Image (spheres, grey):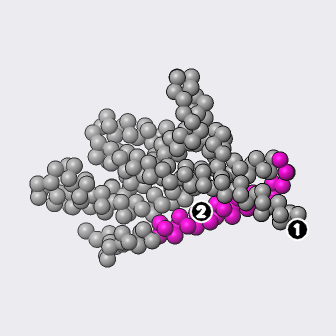
Amino acid sequence: MEELFFIQHEVIPALWRGMIVSIELIVPSAIFGLIIGIIIGNLRVFGNTIVARMANTYVAVFRGFPLVVQLFIWYFGLPHLGIYLSPFVAAIVGFSLCSGAYHSEYVRGALLSIKKGQLLAAQSLGFSKMKMIVFVVLPQAFRRALPGCGNEVIYLIKYSSLAYMITCIELTGEAKIIASETFKYTEIFLIVGAYYLVLTSVATWLLNRFEDRLRLPGFDHYST
């Protein structure tokens, strides 16, 4: 009974508070990451040699550096250059840039999957390169990249737990504080795992609904 009282009045309120912070981190990071991924993916495919190399370098760096190292650089490293970010902002910057690098790989693959005949047809109709990308290539590529990008959003939900490493106290951070005070690590982190399971399940359901809304008859067969 005492254990149940403790969970109900101490653990649950703290974890709900942390989950709200986690959601506040995840939503803008997912949006910014997707935007960055679309831009970088297009630059890697359609940019000139110099631009494409710069975009590829960005992807190599942000996919190669561990995310926790990136967070430490944004929060603990930038002050040495006179730039100070709050833990919350530093976490969003780190998540967005890292997520954008992975999104760009899905976008790049989707862009390359578009048949060249469609590009030639658009050019023959007088489309500029920009109009061809925006009105012909991207609508198709986005649908094809969506499953991979959705998977990256699920990963983002889970690696948002690293924010507490730079003192941004979200769901995992709140759990760590309570567990350190009570030594009830198993019970508390089982509950935290359930919270993340709910978050990823809801995100998966929303992404599946979004994919269904964007699906076109015959599109799954990648018709020309």
Residue type highlighted by circle 2: Leu
Which residue sits at x=45%, y=63%? 147
Q: Position of residue 57 (x, y in %)?
A: 43, 37
Q: What's the mark number on residue 10?
A: none
**Residue 48 vs residue 90, the one in the foreground:** 90
Q: Earlier in the sequence, mark 2 or mark 1?
A: 1
- Spot occupied by residue 9 in the image (x, y as percentages of width and height): 78, 60
Q: Residue at x 46, y 46 (%)?
A: 101
Residue that lies at the very extreme toward the front in this rendered image: 9
Tell me residue 74's x, y (percent): 55, 34
* Residue 103, visible in the rendered structure: no
Residue at the location (36% across, 64% down)?
A: 143
Lateral position of residue 46 relative to residue 109, left or right: left
Identify the image quadrant of the N terminus.
bottom right
Q: Amino acid at mark 1?
A: Met
**Residue 42 location (% of width, % of height):** 33, 48
Single out the mark in the foreground, 2 or 1: 1
Within 10 angstroms of label 2, few (less than 14), some, or many (20 or more) residues?
Answer: some
Residue 55 in magenta? Answer: no
Q: Quadrant of the C terminus?
A: bottom left
Q: Foreground residue, 110 or 200?
A: 200
Marks 2 and 1 sit apart, C-alpha to C-alpha, by 28 Å
For the record, the magenta segment spans 181-208
Numbered tag placed on residue 1 in the rendering = 1
User: Which quarter of the picture shows residue 194?
Assistant: bottom right
Q: Secondary structure at mark 1?
A: loop
In terms of secondary structure, where does tag 2 sit? helix
Q: Nearer the viewer, residue 164 or 122?
A: 164
Q: Which residue is mark 2?
A: 199
Q: Main secondary structure of the magenta part?
A: helix
